[in-house]
Image: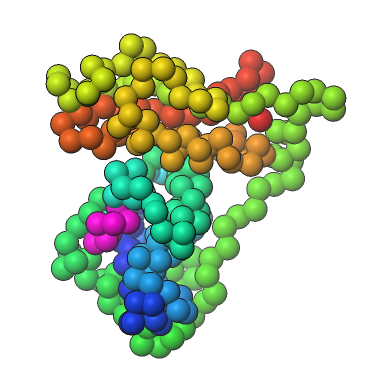
Amino acid sequence: MGLILHIDGGSRGNPGPAGAGVVLRQADGELIHEAAYFLGRQTNNAAEYHALIRGLERARQCDPQPITIYSDSELLVRQVTGEYEVKSPNLSPLHRQVQMLLLRIGGWSLQHLRREENRRADELANLAMDRRRDVIVFDIDGGGTESEEPTPPDCSAAAAEAQRPAPGAAPTPPAVRITVTHGPEAGGCPAGGFAQSAFTIHATLPAGLCIHAAHALTPTVLAILNTDPAELAAVPTLTVRCARPGCRAEFQLSPVRSPNGHTRS
């Protein structure tokens, strides 16, 4: 089981009229969603982010399962995976939105590929720019129709109520538990490796954490810490890899659970 998502975005003028192409399939090749989205006036990089957001919103409507995402934007891939810092004030809110959507996906990976390997998504992005409107070419739940953008499902009131602290109870600061599932390769970590195989992050990073690992972990840690308490229970265990060449350290991140089984909020 698993989903395959191809995305592409572009603009004519940078900034200018922009479009996004989204192709979502099951791992066995069955087509789920194929669409072109008109984005109005955007830069090329912003259009790439909007394409990823549209694709993730549609993927959330499927049964929870891992998703492999392909993009021909090296900047997008390196920023979302933590290798590059997001310095543009226009991209920062889009990056945060992507991080929050990824928190609700049951395992994901994002990979760069050549433009010619992403041809269908590119065609759809250009279709949106040509027609200056959304075109849903195919959707497994509704055939091929013109449609507004999909709306992600709302959290139920019951779920939100279950996560509220008892009246008068002091709120517990959110925290993230990190487990080192694969240590750095020999000579790959300038700090010499990690003294602990698991640690918890609250508002500060633990002493001795390599700066490269901290750089990779921080975007996902912040996304978890800033998640609405009512939605923390739905956050899956996430995998983050150190971006330093030659390190290959791997971590699993999850919200810290309270003794009653609920997520601390």
Counting every numbered tag in the picture gives: 0
Which percent across, then down, holds residue 75?
Answer: 29, 57
Q: Quadrant of the N terminus?
A: top left
Which residue is found at the position 33% from the left and 82% from the top? 12
Give the quadrant of residue 46: bottom left
Q: Is residue 69 above or below residue 262?
A: below
Which residue is found at the position 16% from the left and 68% from the top? 116
Which percent across, then down, holds residue 110?
Answer: 30, 49
Q: Is residue 105 left or right of residue 211?
A: right
Q: Is residue 26 above or below residue 172?
A: below
User: Which span of residues is magenta-colored?
Assistant: 71-77
How did the renderer colour the structure? Answer: rainbow
Q: Is residue 39 left or right of residue 130?
A: right
Q: Is residue 52 left or right of residue 191?
A: right
Please say whether residue 28 is visible from this viewpoint: no
Q: Is residue 237 magenta?
A: no
Q: Is residue 228 above or below residue 112?
A: above
Give the quadrant of residue 128: bottom left
Please say whether residue 89 is visible from this viewpoint: yes
Q: Residue furthest right?
A: 168
Q: Is residue 74 magenta?
A: yes
Which residue is found at the position 23% from the left and 54% from the top? 112
Which percent across, then down, holds residue 192?
Answer: 23, 17
Which percent across, then down, holds residue 71?
Answer: 28, 59
Q: Residue furthest bottom?
A: 131
Q: Nearer the viewer, residue 109 or 77?
A: 77
Q: Nearer the viewer, residue 153 or 201?
A: 201
Give the quadrant of residue 10: bottom left
Q: Quadrant of the C terminus?
A: top right
